[in-house]
Each structure stands twice: as C-alpha cells, then as structure tokens.
Image: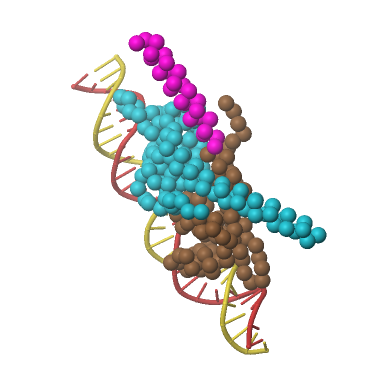
Chain colours: A cyan, B brown, C yellow, D red
DNA sequence: GACATATGATACCATATGGTTCTATTAAAG
DNA sequence: CTTTAATAGAACCATATGGTATCATATGTC
C-alpha cells in the first residue's frame, strides 16, 4: 500500500499538525462540543468556562489555526462556528489506518484457518 | 440531540485525552505510520529517526498510554504494534460531528429552498 | 562467568503551553 | 461626544513537554 498521506508536520495553519494540536487540549474539545450545538460569540463561550476571556480567546485562535472553527464578524461580535475542513483532515488521517485493521483481521483469520488444518 | 460523548478529559491511560495527546506530536504520528507497515522493536523505530533511544522510548510510552499501540515482549525485545482501540476512541469522537455536518447541510439546503420561494 | 545487546528509568535542560493580568482598539448606545 | 460593551494583544508566570545524557537491569552469546 502506498498513499500520499504524510504526518502533517507543517507548522502553518490549516495543516494536519495544527488540527491535531488543537484537538490535544480537553478545553478545546469541550469548546467544539459547545459549538456543535450552536455558533457562539467569544463571550458566550466564556460563560461556559471558569476561565478569563483572554484564555478562551487563545483556545479559539488555536482551533481556528487548526481549521476546526471559522469566525464570522458582525459589528463588534465574533461568531465562532465549526468548520468541517479541519475535522476532515483528522478524519482522513485516522481513516488511513482502517485498511490496516481489515488487512490484519484477514491475516488473523487466515492464520486461524491454517491452524485448523494442523489440528 | 444528546449522547454520552464527553471530552475524554480523564488523565489516566486509555482515555480519549491520552489518545489525543499522543496524536498531537508529529514524531508520534510518524511512528504510527511506520508501525502500520510492520511491527517494530524500539531499536528498529530508533533507526528511522535522528533521536536517541530514550527519546523514542518516551514517545512509545505515550502512544501506549493513548491506547494507540501495544507492546509484546519476547526475550529482551519489545515488539510495538498498532492497537485499534485508541484509534477507535478518536474515530468515535470525531465521528460525533459527522451528524452535525449533515444537519447543517440540510438546514442550508432548506434555507436555499426558502430563498427560492421568495425569488 | 564474562561480555555484548536490548531495554528501563532517572535526572536534567530548553522551550512550548495554558493560564493570568493589564492595556488598547473598535463598535453600539445614550 | 461620552460611555459602555465586545474583542484584540502584549507581557508575564508556572508547569508540561520533547529532548538529552547517564546509569541500571535483563537477556542472549561465547
């Protein structure tokens, strides 16, 4: 098997690395779950955590860098909402291993059959 | 919608948090890609990186804590191989958002249809 | 047993990370 | 225009993290 799948090692925004980094923090994953319910301004997100605005803001910036959320401006508000692209990146990366499992299971099954031949 | 899906905030091994943490490092993701090809001893993994044994060992320990690999002992060697369970945890968590996209797309489509009514 | 090999484990260091406080900007409201 | 609300950004701090060097342990080989 050979694919063009890399590790997403690049440091820039929009890379697989940025997405995985963004997902590595529990607070950020919680924010994503919140945003799955509805888009929210920063202040609204803050209301759901025992943390300062600046703290939440940094998390949102990382989520955005990871391509997991997008920010829409309206007046002085910033509406944060989920962005499929980052999820897609991660999903694809994880999905690469799916083939591995089925291959492995097939091999196990074949091995088991071989064993039976020797019974 | 309501599910029992959490953030996997627990700190112990085998939690979603440990899995996401393990995936957050490029070197560790590269190791996983390596192990997708074949199981490897620590020394073999080390050969693929410009890093000390101890460094690689720490990465392997984190991958194990995240449930992404398992280690089989034979003599003085340790064979590291991929473990589906960690991947499954992550896959499920990401999968939670799949429903969100389709819901959103449906809403967009409905909105578009409403727009057409006003043309 | 002596020696080499594969791993385990600890202490240590530089930097990254998650969080705070404080200050600045921008837009709505009176 | 002054005031208030929502956000942006920088400086700062404690701890986590990725890496190294070093020493200890266990297994294979002669």
**Residue at screen point 38% across, 34% down:** A70
Q: Is residue C25 placed above or below C11 in the rendered structure?
A: above
The magenta stretch spans residue A95: no
Q: Going by the image, does B68 lie left or right of A89? A: right
Residue B17 at what x, y percent from top left? 55, 46
Magenta residues span B95-119
Name above or below for residue A75 compared with residue B24. Answer: above
In the shown orientation, is residue A43 left or right of residue B94?
Answer: left
Q: Nearer the viewer, residue B56 or B31?
A: B31
* Between A119 and B42, the one nearer to me in the picture: A119
Residue A54 % position (x, y): 38, 39
Quick check: can you spot residue B9?
no
Q: For the C terminus of chain A, give its image quadrant.
A: bottom right
Tell which residue pokes out farthest to the right in this image: A119
Is residue C11 rendered to the left or right of residue A110?
left
Residue B109 highlighted magenta (yes or no) = yes
Q: Nearer the viewer, residue A53 or B71?
A: B71
Viewer can see residue B88: yes
- Counting every numbered tag in the picture gives 0
Q: Main secondary structure of the magenta part?
A: helix
**Which residue is at a point 62% across and 57% down the rendered structure image?**
B70
Residue A115 locus on image (x, y percent): 75, 59
In the rendered image of this protein, does residue B85 appear above or below residue A116?
above
Q: Report the front residue among B101 and A53.
A: B101
The residue depicted at 56 percent of the width and 48 percent of the height is: A99
Residue lying at 36% horizontally and 44% vertically, measured from the top left: A13
Q: Residue C27 placed where, x, y %?
A: 28, 24
Q: Residue furthest front?
A: A117
């Amino acid at each position: 098997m050979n694919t063009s799948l890399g590790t997403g090692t690049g440091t820039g925004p929009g890379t697989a690395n940025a997405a995985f980094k963004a997902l590595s923090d529990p607070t950020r994953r919680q924010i994503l779950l919140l945003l799955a319910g509805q888009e929210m301004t920063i202040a609204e997100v803050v209301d759901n955590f025992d943390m300062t605005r600046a703290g939440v803001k940094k998390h949102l910036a990382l989520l955005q860098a990871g391509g997991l959320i997008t920010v829409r401006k309206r007046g002085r508000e910033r509406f944060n909402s989920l962005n499929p692209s980052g999820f897609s990146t991660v999903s694809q990366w994880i999905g690469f291993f799916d083939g591995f499992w089925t291959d492995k299971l097939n091999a196990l099954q074949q091995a088991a059959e071989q064993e039976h031949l020797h019974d």
